């Protein structure tokens, strides 16, 4: 450190707690925190073994301050904040602060005691001490593609539940704990390497945070953290204030292939000045299926949904949450109580985003988009890999249509809303698993027609090679389609095909023999505005590119 | 008869021509306005002028190097060729689907960059090779011809061919290319195995398609430029810079234009390498600050850090590139207060026209340059050696207005703008250094571009760096770099195998293959045996990971080869991740060979070291605001051209020259070295 910066630090500290910190110092330190979280994420991806993390980037990193408040979430997967935001509180409930020391790493995944939202998302949290004081937490979450071929009547069937406990104590790995966890995993070799990568990511974060403490001093940092949260709060308030005051309601039908009923989801939103209240009371009770959301999942989803229509660029920290009040009924599908199963909760989360957007559509039509594909369609293949003789698990969540917007089309074939995982490259998939991708292509007419067309869903067809395997293919939007807005029509639906034809709803696990294929079609997205308002040149272009059929062009768009 | 080396850096506004006399090491510069409708006019014109002006009639050009933004601009502006694409059946939509991530996590209005080939010009042929090289289906001649005719009918000027696993087996792509050549004649054809024979189909596809998109543009450009150069009397084969900092012949550039997308900034980095080499500095962080953006890169032991993959204007490109990180902030970046009440700078820029408020050309929002003018760091009357008149009072008014919204004085606001910019730059440098395991304090900061030397002092302090080297001509380092780059081509091949002695022969075969490709290339470029250099590396990882670390391949034979190789990997891994996993297997994925045709580096002119007193160069004194003490300090202003080797300039001081201004902070000491570089260090307290 140069003498110059030391002087600056001293001046700022001496100025005393009542003098506001200049906005520039706040900006500088905010950037530094952001880069720590970003770099932790890169370390995790690059050092990990399982395809779901190294290629699909199904992981997130968050830096917390010493009080357990979110300072920054790296831009990976929004729903992961739901797991991360509760974990520090849970650690502090279970462990006396005086017993927590430098070099400890906590591990947890439980949705009811571990601060998690489903069991495959394993969180590692490292306390950061400076001069004996707890100043922050470096945390990361990785979705481990494990705990497969399970039932989902309640959470005990879904995998190993881990409350927040130490996997490392004062720098020493707790081998007993590690082995207990690995014994309960179906692909232990990947889990060991991935957990090691998670530890490396945290130790990197701790080191960088220490350097920041050295540079600025803890007193100044803590005041800056307050200011960073206040800043995000101000931005969020400014964003909410730009929405006309009022009471807004919306309801929507939710169905999935795990239970036969169609459920009605609802929300009531009150916007008053720069505050917003979202009331989710009156939603259906929790179900004996994997679709339940715990409260932190609901909060993370709502924060995401509100941020998209208020201030997408606001720093993702705990200050954003302050002007947003969420009310829900414990024991409901959107705010489940133990022991509800939660594994497939993201499908439900996507529809909560739709609820929030749908309710606000009339208030801020230029910012709201038509319904996105509304699902996190997933395929999980497992079996014995004939090339290695070892059990394998290949998880892929599939994107689909992104809703049409007020001034442009939606995006084709992307992950939407609360997730943003990558696909696994075909060449990576086939080198690693005894599977072959036969087709990967957009689905004609799946983008909801409108003045602006909804994004297209896609089809991915996979052939089983030289073994028999089990496939769990799940999704929603089988019976209902993503809705359009202001005259825009609905997008395409979800379906699963095998050689035997279309797979029925409520199918459960599929067993595929050597050489058989499975073909999954993901939902598209809704259109925006009347189809008759679409520029005929765009209709012709879509037709020429085979994104829409001749029938759609003529009958829906009226192309002659 | 004097022998001349000529470099031309063709930018959007200016074309910089520089010339080096080989015998004397003397260097001259000529700057003229670019001719955007046909850049070759200014390039050839400038070269002609500099030859006649400085070289005389009997001059002979021994080298011609060229850096261009033709490829970059075509990509940014979407003005490439009308393309077609042929893929394995079932996969034409890979170009849309990409990696399935959306462009922005929260912004619902964000868009993906437009696909460079529309869906109706993406055709599929019945073709499939498996991961292990097994051929399942070979494309038939009939369907290839049918596809070719369909693309011809659609008016495709360029066609890209990309099949799965073409890096394992090139035959199907080669077959298609041969038939397309018959059917499509002079269309630009490109295959993924030639452009990027590596794993991950989408990134390979994207790179190949970008190459097709740029092909006809680059070919047309070079076809116009070559005859013009010949008319000028340049009879040597001209070279063009690639993104990796090396040069290639026009013929190679016409085939692989995707490799030139960072042609411009990469030459600046080479200029920095050579400037450092002349004075024995080989660990450098470059800081190239222009009007709208800033490029930073890291040079370790005389070698720029490189990367094999980057997103350029939203398009993933896999090709060897100098690892240049760009931030959208430069002298023209606009400062504003955002909705949360924080001071922000950029990425919106006033550019060169209307430019900063002080130019008086109509912009009213304060920029970084205005902050420097207001604080007295930049000359308040004129810039660019007197050519650009400055209205300082306009800067003051604009900044005061901005500050009133923040409750800050004019000076505090100006200083705040500089601090925000410095923080942005520091973050960029951390990204290319700390994030990759390098401590910036082990490096010398080399600022160039118009704005680099203005901000380098504070940036170095922010990062704890205690040495700054400001080149003699910081504004034209890119043009200088052109004269000094080696001819270079990179070869790679993916051959996944475990790092164990049983694979020694396979490794040897892979390396021999690359070496033989390199020899063929050396022959085709006419590079003599004494100028040929190759560097072989391998990308390695723990078996199970998908990201590799580039590791030097040990020299010599089998003895201890694997121990060395594993040791090299462990060192690289420990540095990157802070742990190693000795119980895990190690895998080799890709072999890489860098082939250099070494260009003889002329020695720069060297000056006698004189005494320390700089007073002969003192031209002015002015009050400069120092946020560190919250007041103005009277600071001497020196003329860079009059400073002599050995002169010592203690801060606070300003050093002005035509193309830049250097700020030396209180506590820093500047000294002119024997190559007339200005070296700034923290003083001893």
Image: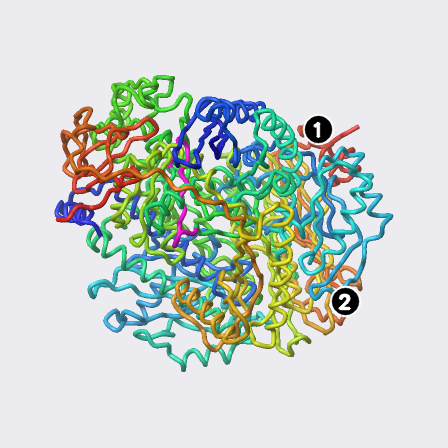
* Label 1: which secondary element: helix
What residue is at 74 percent from the left and 46 percent from the top?
B86
Decide whether residue A505 is among the magenta residues.
no
What residue is at 53 percent from the left and 27 percent from the top?
B43
Dot 1: chain letter: A
Front residue (pair A529, B118): B118
Q: Is residue A17 visible?
A: no
- C-alpha span from label 1 to label 2: 42 Å
The residue wearing badge 1 is A537
Q: Which stretch is magenta?
A: B289-303
Magenta span dominant secondary structure: strand
Say whether disc 1 or disc 2 marks the residue closer to the N-terminus. 2
* Label 2: which secondary element: loop
Decide whether residue B290 is among the magenta residues.
yes
- Residue B675: % across, % down: 31, 39
The residue wearing badge 2 is A516
């Amino acid at each position: 450190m140069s003498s110059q910066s030391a002087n600056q630090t001293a001046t700022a500290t001496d100025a005393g707690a009542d003098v506001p910190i200049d906005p520039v110092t706040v900006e500088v330190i905010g950037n530094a925190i952001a880069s720590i979280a970003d770099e932790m994420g890169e370390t995790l991806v690059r050092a990990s073994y399982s395809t779901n993390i190294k290629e699909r980037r199904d992981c997130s990193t968050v830096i917390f301050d010493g009080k357990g408040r979110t300072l920054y979430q790296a831009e990976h997967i929004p729903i992961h904040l739901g797991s991360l935001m509760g974990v520090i509180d849970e650690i502090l409930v279970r462990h006396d602060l005086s017993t927590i020391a430098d070099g400890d790493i906590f591990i947890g995944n439980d949705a009811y005691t571990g601060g998690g939202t489903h069991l495959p998302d394993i969180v590692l949290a490292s306390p950061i001490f400076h001069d004996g004081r707890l100043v922050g937490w470096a945390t990361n979450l990785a979705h481990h593609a494990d705990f497969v071929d399970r039932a989902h009547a309640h959470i005990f069937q879904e995998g190993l539940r881990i409350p927040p406990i130490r996997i490392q104590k004062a720098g020493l790995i707790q081998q007993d704990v590690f082995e207990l966890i690995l014994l309960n995993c179906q692909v232990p070799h990947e889990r060991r390497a991935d957990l090691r990568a998670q530890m490396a990511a945290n130790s990197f974060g701790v080191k960088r945070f220490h350097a920041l403490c050295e540079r600025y001093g803890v007193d100044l940092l803590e005041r800056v953290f307050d200011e960073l949260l206040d800043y995000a709060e101000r931005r969020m308030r400014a964003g909410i204030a730009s929405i006309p005051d009022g009471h807004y309601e919306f309801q929507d039908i939710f169905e999935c292939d795990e239970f036969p009923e169609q459920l009605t989801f609802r929300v009531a939103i009150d916007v008053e000045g720069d505050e917003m209240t979202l009331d989710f009371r009156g939603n259906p009770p929790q179900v004996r299926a994997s679709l339940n959301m715990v409260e932190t999942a609901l909060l993370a989803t709502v924060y995401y949904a509100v941020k998209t229509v208020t201030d997408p660029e606001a720093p993702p920290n705990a200050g954003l949450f302050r002007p947003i009040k969420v009310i829900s009924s414990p024991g409901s599908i959107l705010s489940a109580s133990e022991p509800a199963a939660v594994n497939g909760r993201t499908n439900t989360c996507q529809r909560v985003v739709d609820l929030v957007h749908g309710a606000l559509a009339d208030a801020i039509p230029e910012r709201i988009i038509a319904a996105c594909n509304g699902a996190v369609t997933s395929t999980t293949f497992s079996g014995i890999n004939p090339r290695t003789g070892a059990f394998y698990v290949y998880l892929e969540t599939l994107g689909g249509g992104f809703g049409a917007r007020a001034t442009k089309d939606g995006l084709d074939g992307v992950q939407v809303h609360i997730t943003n995982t990558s696909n696994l490259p075909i060449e990576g998939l086939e080198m690693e698993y005894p599977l072959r991708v036969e087709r990967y292509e957009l689905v004609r007419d799946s983008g909801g027609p409108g003045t602006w067309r909804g994004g297209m869903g896609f089809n991915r067809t996979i052939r089983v090679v030289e073994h028999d395997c089990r496939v769990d293919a799940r999704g929603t939007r089988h019976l209902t389609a993503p809705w359009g807005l202001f005259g825009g029509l609905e997008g395409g639906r979800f379906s699963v095909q095998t050689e035997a034809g279309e797979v029925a709803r409520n199918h459960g696990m599929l067993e595929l023999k050597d050489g058989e294929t499975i073909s999954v079609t993901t939902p598209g997205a809704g259109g925006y505005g009347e189809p008759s308002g679409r520029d005929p040149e765009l209709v012709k272009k879509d037709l020429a590119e085979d994104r829409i059929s001749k029938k759609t062009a003529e009958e829906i768009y009226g192309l002659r | 008869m004097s022998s001349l080396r000529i470099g031309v850096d063709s930018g959007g506004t200016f074309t910089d021509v520089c010339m080096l006399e080989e015998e004397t090491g003397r260097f001259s510069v000529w700057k003229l306005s670019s001719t955007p409708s046909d850049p070759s006019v200014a390039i050839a014109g400038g070269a002609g002028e500099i030859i006649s002006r400085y070289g005389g009639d009997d001059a002979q050009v021994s080298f011609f190097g060229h850096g261009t933004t033709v490829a970059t601009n075509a990509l940014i502006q979407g003005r490439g060729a009308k393309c077609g694409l042929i893929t394995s059946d079932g996969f034409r939509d890979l170009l849309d689907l990409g990696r399935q991530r959306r462009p922005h996590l929260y912004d619902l209005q964000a868009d993906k960059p437009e696909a460079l080939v529309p869906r109706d010009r993406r055709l599929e042929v019945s073709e499939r090779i498996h991961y292990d090289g097994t051929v399942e289906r070979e494309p038939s001649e009939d369907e290839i011809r049918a596809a070719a005719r369909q693309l011809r009918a659609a008016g495709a000027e360029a066609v890209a061919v990309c099949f799965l696993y073409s890096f394992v087996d090139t035959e199907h792509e080669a077959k298609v290319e041969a038939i397309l050549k018959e059917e499509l004649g002079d269309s630009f054809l490109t295959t993924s195995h030639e452009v990027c024979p590596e794993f991950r189909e989408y990134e390979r596809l994207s790179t190949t398609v970008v190459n097709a998109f740029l092909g006809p543009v680059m070919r047309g450009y070079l076809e116009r430029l070559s005859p013009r150069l010949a008319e000028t009397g340049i009879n040597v084969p001209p070279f063009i810079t690639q993104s990796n900092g090396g040069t290639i012949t026009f013929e190679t550039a016409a085939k692989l234009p995707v490799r030139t997308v960072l042609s411009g900034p990469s030459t600046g980095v080479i200029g920095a390498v050579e400037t450092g080499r002349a004075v024995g500095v080989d660990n450098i962080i470059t800081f190239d600050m222009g009007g709208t953006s800033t490029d930073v890169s890291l040079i370790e032991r005389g070698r720029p850090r490189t990367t094999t993959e980057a997103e350029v204007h939203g398009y993933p490109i896999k090709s060897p590139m100098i690892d240049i990180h760009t931030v959208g902030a430069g002298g023209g970046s606009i400062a504003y207060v955002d909705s949360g009440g924080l001071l922000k700078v950029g990425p919106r820029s006033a550019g060169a026209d209307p430019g900063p408020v002080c130019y008086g050309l109509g912009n009213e929002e304060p920029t970084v340059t205005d902050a420097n003018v207001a604080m007295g760091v930049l000359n308040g009357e004129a810039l660019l050696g007197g050519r650009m008149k400055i209205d300082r009072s306009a800067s003051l008014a604009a900044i005061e207005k901005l500050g009133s919204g923040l409750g800050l004085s004019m000076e505090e606001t100006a200083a705040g703008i500089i601090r925000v910019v410095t923080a942005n730059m520091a973050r960029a440098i951390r990204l290319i250094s700390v994030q990759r395991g390098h401590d910036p304090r082990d490096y010398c900061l080399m600022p160039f571009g118009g704005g680099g030397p203005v901000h380098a002092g504070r940036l170095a302090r922010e990062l704890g760096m205690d040495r700054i080297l400001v080149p003699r001509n910081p504004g034209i380092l890119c043009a200088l770099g052109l004269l000094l780059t080696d001819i270079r081509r990179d070869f790679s091949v993916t051959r996944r195998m475990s790092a164990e002695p049983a694979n020694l022969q396979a490794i040897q075969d892979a390396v021999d293959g690359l070496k033989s490709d390199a020899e063929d290339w050396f022959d085709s470029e006419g590079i003599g045996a004494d100028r040929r250099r190759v560097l072989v590396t391998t990308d390695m990882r723990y078996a199970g990971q998908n990201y590799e670390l580039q590791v030097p391949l040990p020299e010599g034979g089998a003895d201890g080869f694997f121990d060395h190789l594993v040791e090299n990997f462990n060192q690289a891994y420990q540095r990157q991740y802070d742990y190693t996993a000795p119980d895990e297997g190690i895998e080799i994925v890709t072999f890489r060979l860098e082939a250099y045709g070494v260009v003889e580096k002329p020695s720069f002119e060297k000056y006698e070291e004189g005494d320390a007193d700089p007073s002969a160069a003192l031209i002015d004194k002015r009050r400069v605001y120092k946020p560190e003490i919250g007041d103005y300090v009277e600071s001497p202003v020196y003329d860079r051209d009059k400073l002599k080797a050995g002169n010592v300039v203690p801060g606070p001081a300003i050093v002005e020259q035509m193309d830049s201004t250097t700020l030396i902070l209180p506590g820093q000491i500047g000294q002119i070295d024997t190559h007339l570089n200005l070296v700034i260090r923290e003083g001893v307290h």
